[in-house]
Image (cartoon, coloured by chain):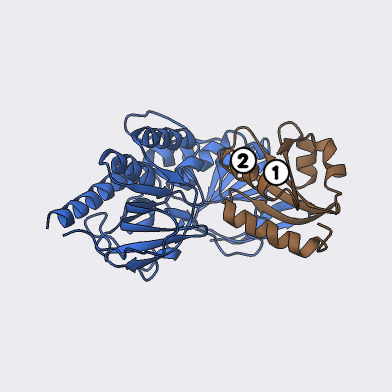
Chain colours: A brown, B blue
Amino acid sequence: MRQIKGAEMKALVADTAKITLVDFSASWCGPCQMVHPVLEALSSEMADKVSFFKIDVDESPSEAGAMGVRGVPTMIVFHGGKEIDRQVGFRDKADLRKTLDSLADRFLTPGKA
Amino acid sequence: MEFHLPPDNSGTGSVVDLVIAGGGPAALSAALYAARYGLGHIVLESWQPGGQAALTALIENYPGVPSVPGAKLSGIMRSQALEAGARFTTETVSSVEPLGEGFLVRTESASHTAKTLIIATGAAPAKLGVPGEDRYYGRGVSFCATCDAPFYRGRRVVVVGGGDSAVKEALHLSGVASGLVLVHRRDTLRAEPRLAQRLLDCPTCEVRWNSTLKAVTGDEQGVTGVDLETPSGLEHLDTDGVFLYVGTKPATGPFRGLVELDARGAVLTRNIVETSRPGVYAAGDVTSNGFRQVVTAASDGARAAWAAFEYLEDRRQN
């Protein structure tokens, strides 16, 4: 999972071939450190349908603010530049995977994903 | 008499003496003791590793450790258990059923056959159930001051509750927020007197006594205010954040039907850690025990591991 700067986000989340999860997190936040390995594992297991990026809210405060992020971790899922889901706080792997699978089913065209 | 478990059990995971469900101080302490007793075990760390303790800014009343961030304390407990030989997986229990003289513990990805079980799945913050609470979760509504306080530097916040957690986290928030209002439905704080006094002395903090939160209001960006019912009528307060500490809900869903629960949904215990079913023990905030602290969770965990050990020894000898 690659860490990006806020300014890179807009272009990356415009993808329509995959859905994109952006994890807004911070170095001082316990649940962020706990959810990190979950996202790392999912990013290799779900590489065919979900792209994963991480934004440090201290490094990119204006993008976090513009997205209405007031807590970390906030994981926002995009498709074609639009927000399609938002998860706040720690999520376990099975739970997050289920959410992402159902979003991928809904938003990705079968055969093209 | 040896333990009778069906030889060809349907478990896809391990066959163990003890399954410990949970990941907070109660489970970590049970894991430490189980490992040192040499019990074949597995710890199914639940949805929140480190439990509620890991989300607590500062723990000041754990004996032997003067003042420590909760995440650090639970991290030390976990490494200590690991060093003793504890085995962890990040599975979450979905159901448990009796199987022969033991139990079949199912998770989303495996099932484990266990001779004994310790329920230490803790509790999650309770919701108020008021309009706006779900809509603005993560956009101004928070259950974790430790996680979210830095977003409220120089801003106004409301904290709801009057117990230890509410007051402790309000004090943490008061260090960054420009102003803080604590909303409490009673006329005195239930928190430890030392914490309560610190809040009453805090120059940027106010308390609305005998008041309840009726709604969270906001716009596209997030929370902008709250509606309160106070003794002098309805009051609207402008605020940027609302932190809720209105009690907890025990995480007992998967154990319903296996052991007796109380009216709150907590595991009903006898002798601190015994449940209504032999071989099943409970520890920490998931129990009906009256006092819920990190130190009592750790203590329950140790007792539960000991009880499981004794239970298994008795069965081996008879």
Q: Which mark is residue A36?
A: 2
Identified at 38% across, 28% down, the residue is: B66
**Residue B65: horizontal and vertical position, in percent?**
36, 29
User: Residue B264, located in which quarter of the rendered image?
Assistant: bottom left
Q: Secondary structure at mark 1?
A: strand
Q: Indicate which disc, 1 or 2, sits on the residue closer to the N terminus.
A: 1
Kindly report which numbered mark, 1 or 2, lies closer to the viewer in this rendering: 2
Please say if B19 is above or below A102: above
Chain letter for mark 1, please: A
- Cα–Cα gap, marks 1 and 2: 9 Å
Please say if B278 is above or below B70: below
Q: Is residue B284 left or right of residue B49?
A: left
Q: Which mark is residue B277?
A: none
- For badge 1, the amino acid type reads Asp
Residue carrying label 1: A23
Callout 2: 10 Å neighbours few (<14), some, many (20+)?
some
Q: Is residue A43 left or right of residue B9?
A: right
- For badge 2, the amino acid type reads His
Q: Is residue B158 left or right of residue A56?
A: left
Q: Residue furthest left?
A: B318
**Residue B5: horizontal and vertical position, in percent?**
29, 63
Identified at 35% across, 35% down, the residue is: B62
